Amino acid sequence: MRKKHKNISTETFDDFLDEQGLRAETEAVAIKRVLAWQIEESMKKQGITKTEMAARMKTDRRQLDRLLDPDNQSLTLGTLSRAAQALGRQLKIAIV
């Protein structure tokens, strides 16, 4: 029979992030990383080069590189929308 340790917390990671005031920032970083990955994967599946993608978005390669950089959080909805459209996809945003 296992003993319960009184020092073990039942606190979740989300609870910890909330206590530290880091949850919103952490979620924003995770969302950006997922979006960058999804865009890059769609480009690969469709055989779209970065040069072609930038042209479809009516932007330059540096702007596209910022979009695909998972650590760069300076995105606008317009940029995301143009990327989705360039891939023949839709951008859906929800507040839940």
Image: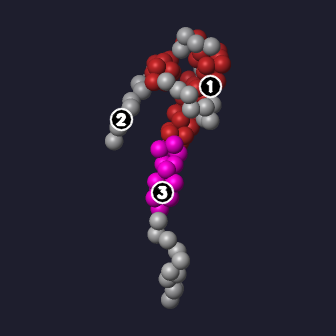
Which disc number belongs to residue 19? 3
Viewer can see residue 33 = yes
| Amino acid, disc 2 | Ala
Q: Earlier in the sequence, mark 3 or mark 2?
A: 3
The answer to whether residue 18 is above or below residue 82 is below
Residue 25: which disc? none
Q: Quadrant of residue 61?
A: top right
Q: State the CA–CA distance, disc 3 to disc 1.
A: 31 Å
Q: Which residue is mark 2?
A: 94
- SS class, disc 3: helix
User: Image point 64% across, 24% down: which residue?
Assistant: 65
Secondary structure beneath disc 2? loop
Mark 2 to mark 1 CA distance (whole Å): 23 Å
User: Bounds of the magenta span?
Assistant: 12-27
Where residue 20 sits in the image (x, y, percent)?
A: 51, 54
Instruction: Estimate the x, y position of residue 69 in percent, counting from the top left.
Output: 63, 31
Q: How is the image coloured?
A: secondary structure
Front residue of 81/27: it is: 27
Q: Quadrant of the C terminus?
A: top left
Mark 1 highlights which residue? 66
**Residue 39 in picture, x, y percent from top left:** 54, 29
Q: Is residue 41 above or below residue 5?
A: above
Q: Amino acid at mark 1?
A: Arg
Residue 50 sits in quarter:
top right
Q: Earlier in the sequence, mark 2 or mark 1?
A: 1
Q: Residue at x 51, y 49 (%)?
A: 22
Name the magenta segment's main secondary structure: helix
Residue 72 screen position, x and y as percent: 61, 31
Q: Earlier in the sequence, mark 3 or mark 1?
A: 3
Q: CB under 8 Å between callouts 3 and 1?
A: no
